[in-house]
Image: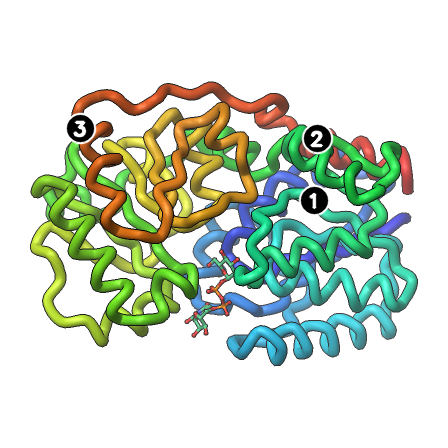
């Protein structure tokens, strides 16, 4: 049997691999493609990792490299050493990586240097901003990828421009949206829904974890004060990423309507998004989910690698200057936010398309 290594390391990877594993399993007992699930251990807290495996029905990883936290280089190095040792002892026929986290890049490098071909899901997207580690991860990974699975025509065009041959680009859609649609009826309100006074369309959701927004207390404090005021007293539910939590402790008083909560599991988080008046975020993946849900999304960054969430979806770039936020939120309050449409092939069947391609080419 042909065996694929499926690599997962950090939270945004888990919703992407869930749909691919489901499609592989659906092939039944005489399936031709087997897989080995490798968790690098980049994210290790239950709230950042285990809860997602449990809710999304992802099987226990066959291997956990347990690399833990570290600087960009030390984390990448630990993942490469661990995965190289694994592959050297027991080789697979393909290394499948998803997204743009450190684990994505590190495993692609280790595999390709052992002449194990690499498939990249969510290939070809670019923000053009080299200050983000994710952009470096995308570029390095795509430079050594054999099979490119893409989410959009923009990604296809970026790859063509970089000289990738047409027959290696497979425009399959969005596995993250597969997972959202598959779990739509399982989304549920978090236990704090009533205690925080939340009502349909009567609160905002905020997530922040990019180093540029959260690593300095002054910068994070300025964002939170502006958001608190512009929200006109409505609750702002703020699931706090571990990276952000460290800085938050150094900020004094928080706006009265800000509601910091623990990182939320998948069903609860997406329920919150689905029923929010709007979402404010510096994440990329969330802008795709809000596009599909039709919820207004304000991205607190200067760039995006997902332009279709703006040209087709409900997302808008606000930038990194908090003073721009009030105007945008006023438009949400006045009902002047755009309504979007769902990009092509974000239809819940991307995992199946990926497995069909793999069956054909492997
Ligand atoms: C990583 C990804 C980012 C993704 C984000 C989602 C890279 C370069 N970045 O950023 O693309 O959007 O995950 O969460 O791969 N920590 C914990 N528990 C955990 C994991 C992390 O406490 O389970 C803390 C650690 O102290 C660590 C910090 O969070 O230093 C940051 O974690 P790290 O994985 O380095 O990067 P993220 O900021 O989470």
The number of numbered discs placed on residues in the rendered structure image is: 3
- Measure the C-alpha gap from mark 2 to mark 3: 36 Å
Residue drawn at 35 percent across, 42 percent down? 318
How many residues crowd around disc 3 within 10 Å: few (fewer than 14), some, or many (20 or more)? some
Q: Which residue is mark 1?
A: 123
Q: From the viewer's perspective, is 183 left or right of 162?
A: left
Q: Which residue is mark 2?
A: 172
Disc 1, ligand 1: is the CB inside 8 Å?
Answer: no
Classify 10 Å Cα crowding around label 2: few (below 14), some (14-19), many (20 and above): many
Whether residue 227 sits left or right of residue 342 in the image: it is left
Residue 106 placement: quadrant = bottom right
| Above-or-below relation of 324 to 311 | below
Instruction: Name the residue beneath numbered marker 3.
Output: 333
Q: Secondary structure at mark 3?
A: helix
Task: Tell me if I can see residue 194 in this picture.
Answer: no
Q: Earlier in the sequence, mark 1 or mark 2?
A: 1
User: Eyeballing the image, is 338 above or below 114?
Assistant: above
Please name the residue shown 61% across and 80% down the image.
74
- Colour pattern of the rendering: rainbow
Give left or right: position of 251 versus 358. left
From the top left corner, tell me how far across and down residue 353 is, in percent.
73, 30
Q: Residue 253: x, y in percent?
A: 10, 67
């Amino acid at each position: 049997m042909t065996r694929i290594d499926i690599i997962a390391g950090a939270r945004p990877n888990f919703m992407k691999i869930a749909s691919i594993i489901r499609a592989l399993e659906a092939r039944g007992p005489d399936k031709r493609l087997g897989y080995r699930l490798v968790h690098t251990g980049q994210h290790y807290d239950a709230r950042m990792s285990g809860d997602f495996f449990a809710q999304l029905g992802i099987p226990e990883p066959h291997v956990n490299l347990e690399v833990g936290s570290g600087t960009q280089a030390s984390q990448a190095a630990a993942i490469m050493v661990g995965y190289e040792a694994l592959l050297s002892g027991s080789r697979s026929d393909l290394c499948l990586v998803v997204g743009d986290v450190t684990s994505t890049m590190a495993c692609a490098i280790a595999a390709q240097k052992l002449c194990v071909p690499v498939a990249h899901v969510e290939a070809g997207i670019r923000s053009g901003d080299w200050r983000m580690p994710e952009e470096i991860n995308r570029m390095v990974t795509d430079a050594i990828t054999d099979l490119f699975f893409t989410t959009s025509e923009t990604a296809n065009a970026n790859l063509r421009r970089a000289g990738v041959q047409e027959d290696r680009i497979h425009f399959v859609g969005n596995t993250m949206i597969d997972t959202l649609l598959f779990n739509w009826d399982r989304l549920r309100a978090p236990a704090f829904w009533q205690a925080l006074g939340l009502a349909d369309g009567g609160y905002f959701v905020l997530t922040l974890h990019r180093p540029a927004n959260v690593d300095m207390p002054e910068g994070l404090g300025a964002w939170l004060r502006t958001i608190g005021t512009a929200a006109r007293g409505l609750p702002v539910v703020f699931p706090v990423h571990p990276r952000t939590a460290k800085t938050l402790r150094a900020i004094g008083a928080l706006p009265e309507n800000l509601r910091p909560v623990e990182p939320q599991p998948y069903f609860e988080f997406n329920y919150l998004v689905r029923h929010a008046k709007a979402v404010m975020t510096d994440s990329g993946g969330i802008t795709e989910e809000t596009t599909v849900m039709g919820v207004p999304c304000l991205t607190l960054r200067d760039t995006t690698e997902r332009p279709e969430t703006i040209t087709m979806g409900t997302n808008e770039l606000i930038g990194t200057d908090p003073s721009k936020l009030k105007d945008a939120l006023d438009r949400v309050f006045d009902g002047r936010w755009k309504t979007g449409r769902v990009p092509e092939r974000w239809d819940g069947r991307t995992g199946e398309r990926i497995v069909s391609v793999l069956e054909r080419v492997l």
